Image (cartoon, rainbow, N blue to C red):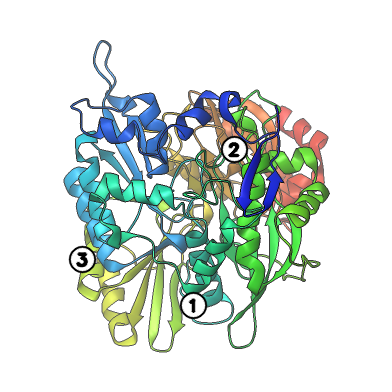
Amino acid sequence: MSEQRVTVTAGTERQFSPCIATGAERSKFEQLKADSDYLRDPLLEELGNEQPNFTDGAVQLLKFHGSYQQDNRDNRQKGQDKDWQMMLRLRSPGGRIPASLYLALDALADRLGNGTMRATTRQAFQLHGVRKHNLKEVIGTIVRAMGSTLAACGDINRNVMCPAAPYDKGAYPAARQLANDIADTLAPQAAEGAYLDLWVDGELSYRIKPSRTVKQVRERQQQQGVFSGDANEPLYGGTYLPRKFKCAVTVPGDNSVDLLTQDIGLVAFADASGALKGCNVYVGGGMGRTHNKEETFARTADPLGYVDAEHVLDLVQAILALQRDYGDRQTRRHARMKYLIHDQGIAWFKQELKANYFPHPIKGMRLEPKSKLEDYLGWHRQGAGLWFVGIPLLCGRLSGALKQGLRELVQTYQLEVRLTPNQDLLLCNIGTAQRSTLRDALAELGITTPEEPSLLARHAIACPALPLCGLAVTEAERILPDVLDRLDAQLRRLEIGKSILVRMTGCPNGCARPYMAELGLVGDGVNQYQLWLGGTPNLQRLAEPYLERMPLERLETTLEPLLLGWKAAGGRRSFGDYVHKLGRDSVKTLLASAG
C-alpha cells in the first residue's frame, strides 16, 4: 500500500503509515465511514422510513451513536420477521449518573424499553427493547436530560472508566477529573455535530463543554503528528479508528477498573493537596478474541512509563493518533492496538510515539502498591457530612421492585448514582441525617447487608449474551446465578471456605473480561464453554484455556480434582495462584482425572 502525504500546518508535511485507509485501498467498512459525512448517512435517511430495522450500513454507523440493532432470539419463529429492537448505551465517564438523568432513564426503560436497565462492565447503563421508531425520542430525551450516547460504541474512544467511589480524599478526585478530561479530549468533533443533528434536531446547546485545559489540548490536535489531515475531525479523520479504543484511570492500589485490559491505563498520582502530579501509563491491553483463530488473543497492557500531569492529555491523544495511523484497517479482527504493540514491540511503539507524536519526556515507571479489586459495597464515608452506599447487582440488571424502589429513593433524596466496573450501583451524596432513613428503605427492598453478598457473587460478572446479543453463542447473564449456586454448594460440600473470581461470557469477545478471572467460562456452543483458569483475584495475570466445549452440566465433575488439590495444598494461595503454581501439565492431568 502506498504512503499518503497530508498537509498538516503551513509549510509542514508528514508521512503517514502505509496502514492508514486511503482512497481505493480502503476496505468496504472503511469506505462506508469515509462516505458517511461524519457518521450521518445513510443513518439519517433511514431514520425517517417505515421499516422496522436499519440496513447493514446504517447499523454500522448507529454504533458510533451508542446503539446496536438486535433481534430477540427468544421470539424467532420460522417464516416470521425478526423481532427487531435497539440497545442503547450511555457515555458516562467514571459511571456518574446524576439524579435527573437516572430518573429519565428509568422512565424511558418502562415506557419505550423492555422495563429493565443494565449496568455494564464499562460503567454505563444500557437500555434494551427500544423500537426503531422510538429511537430518536429515547436518545433525544437522554441528551436533554444532560446525558449522551455518543461514542459509547463504534470505532472510537469508548466510555472512560475510573473508580466509581466518590471519595473526597487522596488521588480519587484527580482521577475522576482526569477521566472526564480524557473523555472530552477524545470526543469526536464533526461527529458530535452529526449526533446532535440526528437526535435533537441540531440543538447546539447540548454540545460537550470542555474545560479550558481540554480546549487547549484539543487545539493541539491541529499540530503535526496528532493531526489527521481533516480539519473538521482533526484527531480522528473521516474514517475514525480501525477499531474500538478503551481508556481507564485509577489511583495507586485500586484495580476496580481492570487496568491491564485497556488500550490505555493510567494510574494517577496526586500530591498532598490532591492535585495531579502525573501518571504511570500502560498500553496495549484488550480482551476480544475469536474461537479457532490463533492470531486473535487476549492481552494485558505493557508499562510505557511515567508522564507529568501537564502532558498526560497530550500523551493520550498522541497514543490514539498513533493507533489511528498504524492500526490494521484491512483485517478488523487484527485492528486493536494490542496487536500493533504485539507485532511491533513496545520499544518500537515508544520510539515512534516520541519521534512523531509526543515531544515530552516519558520517564521510568513509579512504584505502585499491590493492587486490589475494590468494589465499595456497603456504607462508606464520602466526605464531610456525606456518605455513599454500594449495592450489589448481580449481572447489573435492574428490574421489578428493586428498580422501582431505587427510583423512589433517587427521586426523594436527589441522590447521584455511580456504576462500578463490577456492575454494582452506588447511591451517593447521602447526608448524615438521611443515613438511617435510607438504611431502613433499603432493608424494605431486601438489602439489609449490602456489604456482605455471597463470596462467589461478590465479584462475579457476566455479559448479556442470549437472547439479544447477536454475537452470543450461548447463555451467560441468565444462567450465572445458577452456576454460582452450584459452585457455592460444591465449595461448601468440600469444606473450602475461600472464594473464586468467576466470569462468564456467551462468546469469545470478552465483554465480561473472562480472561482475567480465576475461573472463566467462555461460550463455545450451546450449553458448552471453554474453561479458562489461573487469573488472579486482583486482576494482574491472564488466565489460560484448558478445555474446549466443556458441557456446563460437567462443571462440578470437571473441577472437583482441582478443588480437592487446592484444599490439600492448604488454601494459602488463591485458587488462581494455585493453578498457576501447579503448572499447565499438572492442571491438565487433574482435569483429565475427573470422573
Q: Work out whether mark 2 precedes mark 3 in sequence or the reverse, and give the earlier one.
A: 2
Q: CA distance from mark 2 to mark 3?
A: 38 Å
Give yes or no for contact between labels 2 and 3 (Cβ–Cβ under 8 Å): no
Q: Is residue 265 visible?
A: yes
Quadrant of the frame with the N terminus: top right
Q: Is residue 526 above or below residue 579?
A: above
Q: Which type of secondary structure does the marked residue at label 1 adopt?
A: loop
Give the percent coordinates (x, y) of residue 107: 20, 54
Which residue type does callout 1 highlight? Tyr
Q: Residue furthest top?
A: 79
Q: Is residue 567 visible?
A: no
Q: Nearer the viewer, mark 1 or mark 3?
A: 1
Q: Is residue 209 above or below residue 533?
A: below
Give the percent coordinates (x, y) of residue 568: 75, 49
Give the percent coordinates (x, y) of residue 583: 81, 41
Which residue type does callout 3 highlight? Glu
Kindly indicate the quadrant of the structure image that contains residue 556. top right
- The residue drawn where x is 70% and y is 34% is 3
- The residue drawn where x is 60% and y is 55% is 258
Disc assigned to residue 288 = 2
Q: Which type of secondary structure does the marked residue at label 2 adopt?
A: loop
Disc assigned to residue 408 = 3
Q: Which type of secondary structure does the marked residue at label 3 adopt?
A: helix
